[in-house]
Amino acid sequence: MARGGRGKSNWANQRGRRSMASHKGTHAKSGNRYASFTGAETDDGEINAELGERFRGALDFKNRDVPDDNIPSSGPSRTNSDIREYVQLAKKPVAGGAWLDQPEVPSPSEVLRAKSDYRSNGESLIELDPSLRPNKIQGAYQDIEDYLGTMYELQREDAVRPLREAIDEIRTDPFKSEAEYNNQSIGIYDPVYITSLVFSPRGLATRVAFSLGRVKKHIRWEQSKRLITGTLVALSPVDDAFRTQCVLATVAARPLSALAQNPPEIDLFFARPKDQEIDPMRKWIMVECRSSFFEASRHTLLALQHLMREPFPLSQYLVHAQKVVEPPKYVKHNPYVNLSSLVSMEESADYENVSVLENWPTMSSHSLDVSQSKALKRMLTRELAIVQGPPGTGKTFVSVVALQILRDNLRKDDAPIIVTAQTNHALDQLLRHTSQFEPNYIRLGGRSKDKDIKMRTLFEVRSNTPPQKQQPGSQKVQATMAMKRLTVACQLLLVPLEANRGPLDHKVLLGLGLITKEQAESLEMESKCIMGSSPSDGPGILMEQWLGKCLTPCDRPIGPEQFDWGFEEEDFEVEQLKELEAEAVAQDDDEIEALRGPVTLLSDNFRGTGAPLTDNEVLNVLRTDDLTTVPVALRGAIYNYFKREAKRLILVEVRNIAQLYQETVVQRKVGLWDEDVRILRDARIIGCTTTGLAKYRALLSALRPRVCIVEEAAETLEAPVTAACFPSLEHLILVGDHQQLRPHTQVRAFEDEPYFLNLSLFERLVENEIAFDTLTRQRRMIPEIRRLLYPIYEDTLKDHKSVKDSSNRPPVEGMGGNNSFFFCHEWPESRDPNMSALNTTEAHMIVQFFDYLVLNGVDPTKITILTFYNGQRKELLRKLRAHPNLRVYPGIQVVTVDSYQGEENDIVLLSLVRSNRNHAIGFLSSENRACVALSRAKRGFYIFGNAELLATESDTWAAVIKIMWKNTKFKVTTGQQRRLGYQFPLECSKHERKIWCEEPQDFDMIKGGCDVKCDGVLPCGHRCPYMCHPFEHDRINCTQKCSRRVEACGHPCVAVCCDPCKCDMCERRSNGVKSTLKPAPNGATPFRGSRTNTRNLILENTILGPSGRAVHSASTQMMAPQGSVSTTAHWEAYASGGAQQDDARMYAMRKEVEARFLEQMRTSTPAPASGLSPSPAPAKLIPISPEKAAAAAASRNTELLVDVDIDIEPRSQQDRRHARSSYANAGSSTVRGGGSVAFNLLD
């Protein structure tokens, strides 16, 4: 099938390609030789081989007084000199190692390198690769080149090696499915086809469609790590499969709407213009390694190369390990600082001009403790300040105090202060505090959830800044216009390959030099003879006539796939995935344009049939000047030759244009940065992530900042922090805790000796005995939990008085004062398909305990479940979603330890997972991870794991277990010393009885209480069947046999108590008993006046599970008053008065009257409602048909008539039963998915 039906993609807000008609007119006037592609006559039949030179003039605008004819002259470029110099400096040759000349994106040879180049006898790559220099933990580097080169080589190998190893494994057996490879991180997509080119402001992108046939699973792309923006992918022709050929590309965009298509599509940037491809029929294999993310390292690598070409401040500490740290130069010059923000207004005058290099002042009214005050002094007086902040000690608070003082002391012309953090979450937290005293800040990067901070992103600030008049000769304008001209030229070249076209036109073949002028004329003469007139002007018509039946439509390269696959489990927590992708392409700033731009759809619409011919055989046939003499049987093969050669020749010129286009993109970016510098100079504080430090380095360097504060410095790799050493930098402040999480590497082997790539700059400086201060007063954990950190911090951590106050940290409900406990077990672990560890029984136990806490009144949002393994996280989520009581709570926090640093919650449940006979504990052996896991809880901390295994394999965990077992070193309440055992100690809040749970099913027996039978009375009169429970009886559905009679017929009810009454004898249904009808959450009441649109009122039905947990479902009822105007007025008055009494019954009656349709109608006195007088006589409630109701309404004006339509849309059978019960109590005598009933109130 031809691909003629393919339309423009609607997922990138494409502006679409200009019409070819306009191209014809433009180039006809200019005499462009490419006019032959559109059918125009030319003097020269050969394609212009000098296209690259012709369009290179579009870039030659830096030192030109008169640009292209289409650009008015405006004199020299107005680009900011600092930015222009920064970009030019990157091209400057410099003495040093080969690493300085490495390309930005790896070359094919770099990823095709075989295992044998690095390994022998099973030894790992890093042990045998002599080019990799080890990281230095102790001592100085030889020089700056040694330092930067080591950082660069290790960082690059860490970024590239995962993809190389994936390719190496595929090369050995290229046709397996993903699951059959040993490397479970391999992502393989086969086949892949090019569908279009996108001429975006970010670059020339190639859109590809791909098959999931070798994945063999459906993908939840919003939670999948596959092909996220910035991922490095490798492509190879299917017939080569990485044996000799490979091209590299990065994912340019992955909109979910494009991935939801069948087949899915993404956009790629080829690494090198000379690798650009255009053939829409060529099959490719595309490979990624899902365990690595190249974009996280890409900008850092460029920054390290750039640092070798400029002054490197603070190198005496970073490179040469100097221990004595001097004050910042600007402080030496003027040591007097305004500290008034630290004290009250009454004292402020005395602290407005303090010499911080002399005696540090004592301040009675400030909120800093002694250790924080000491750390603040270091932050203000040392050019390299290091502050360690253990859990809960207020690292961010001290950073904000220091930042406010630094801001208060900025002069008008001083550069902004740079603040940075490893994660977007931590950065936003810092900026949120900053906004309280400095509203004039700007955030670089757009991954912020905070609405206020989002309004302070560079993109938003730029959008709200009055635009300056664009100078016609500005670099941005010139580059933009050059890109447009290159786009037009490339689109003209691609006309023969466009979708929805016929076969190649003979004039295209003539222009490409594939046929001679005489051969073209022979086709025209033949057409003239056939048509009896001048040949048709339609493109390809002559070739179609010449080929006849030898021409057939091409099959679509890849079509919709229909496979009975399951869904792949999500790779990440959603926020982790967003965090990972956040800095790949800025979701804001100039790059918010994403991939909007003209699109050229590519398609190979027709092919020749018949036996193939070699190129030499085709050339022999084409020696004739008259193509009509070519045998018909050979014409199909000749046409296929024309197609191959046309693609080859066009590709050469497209690659030339791609090179020019890439250069123009860089120049346009420089022009944009020029505008941004003007905006950023007006800010007082600029925030970005540590990845952003490298990505926006040119922009930040042009501001000439002298102060930079790095939060989470101990969790950040050294290289990104080194990128913050701008030539102008005088003051670097590092805040973190090297005893918590270390940085992550993409290749775990690089974390070990001798490379230690996961060693942060913070930790390396501490290891080299550069002075630092430690915060000591923690304000998070109750002492019972804080004591577990003794093996890590020893006596460093002290408790603030606030954590000792039980009103601030109340005991955990239902635990009898056991606010921490280690539940021991020996349940064996297992592995998920991604080889991540999980422990199913442990997960079940944790979920059951979670439910127990919720039943005892703990808010589910105040509980976090932590685990060291992503496989266990998924298992916990599955069990939570399946639990009848817990599945109704959205957003239960189940997260990995690595993603929870800096966070806290009231109660933490920690799943350790590991339990095996091999004595392997994996991640649990990391003291840094243990530190984070042990320090997240404020008032309740419960550990689940194999204590015996941990005690034998980890000194840290052995010490923690000893504390929880003996507890002799620490003072706790008498009788509450032991916090470890194989039975979980619970306590009933009603009976003060201890309950011990050993297995998950033990929790099913107690329903949140204890083992004493409740024996209370339910609202229906039956005895409560459960054991002791903490929740009220009105939340329980009674399942005993109903003792009532059916209202409509009077026969005994055969249903259970909680269901609507039912009679088997006459098969009639009537009102039930238990109504849970109540106002909807939005405040709507079940009854309203007709003026408020009563046709679709939302009613909320509460459905109670077997353990009393409420499950909510919504239905709607339609109602409208019937009868005269006075009846309507009565109804309005009644409804407006609010008829929510007596369990939301249809009419306001006294509580003692149960309005049931029994054998005889009971009587009652209606409750007064607004606008109605109380009736002295009892009223009768009589069910009547709508017809009778209408007649009664016409004859009697003392009646209050209501017609109710009930629309029930329950989601399950249980929902349906309870919905019927609820609506029946509201007044309907017929509830079967819809019905109508009227009631008559008689005076």
Image (spheres, helix red, strand yellow):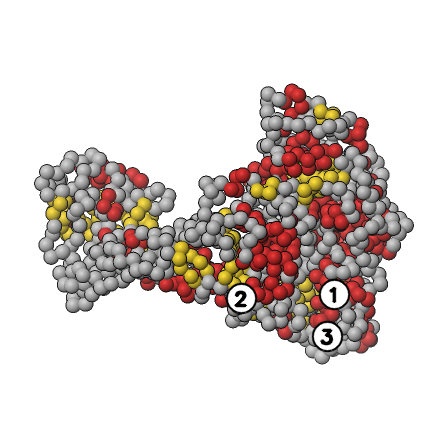
State how far apart marks 3 and 2 are (Cα). 34 Å
Count neighbours of disc 2 (C-alpha within 10 A) and say few if under 14, some if 14 to 19, many if 20 or more: many
Tell me which numbered mark, 2 or 1, is placed earlier along the sequence. Answer: 1
Which label is found at residue 48?
A: none
Tell me which numbered mark, 1 or 3, is placed earlier along the sequence. Answer: 1
Residue under label 1: 164
Q: Residue at x 75, y 42 (%)?
A: 771
Residue under label 2: 839
Compared with 1175, 239 (above or below) is: below
Q: Looking at this view, is 505 or 568 the one in front?
A: 568
The image quarter containing residue 626 is bottom right
Identify the amino acid type marked 3. Answer: Thr
Tell me which numbered mark, 3 or 2, is placed earlier along the sequence. Answer: 3
Compared with 648, 41 (above or below) is: above
What percent of the width, then of the height, locates residue 274? Answer: 79, 59
**Drawn side of residue 411 relative to residue 802, left or right:** right
Q: Are marks 1 and 3 in contact (CB under 8 Å)?
A: no
Label count reads 3
Q: Looking at this view, is 32 or 645 the one in front?
A: 645
Which structural element holds mark 2?
loop
Q: Residue at x 34, y 56 (%)?
A: 1029
Q: Residue at x 70, y 41 (%)?
A: 773
Compared with 916, 479 (above or below) is: above
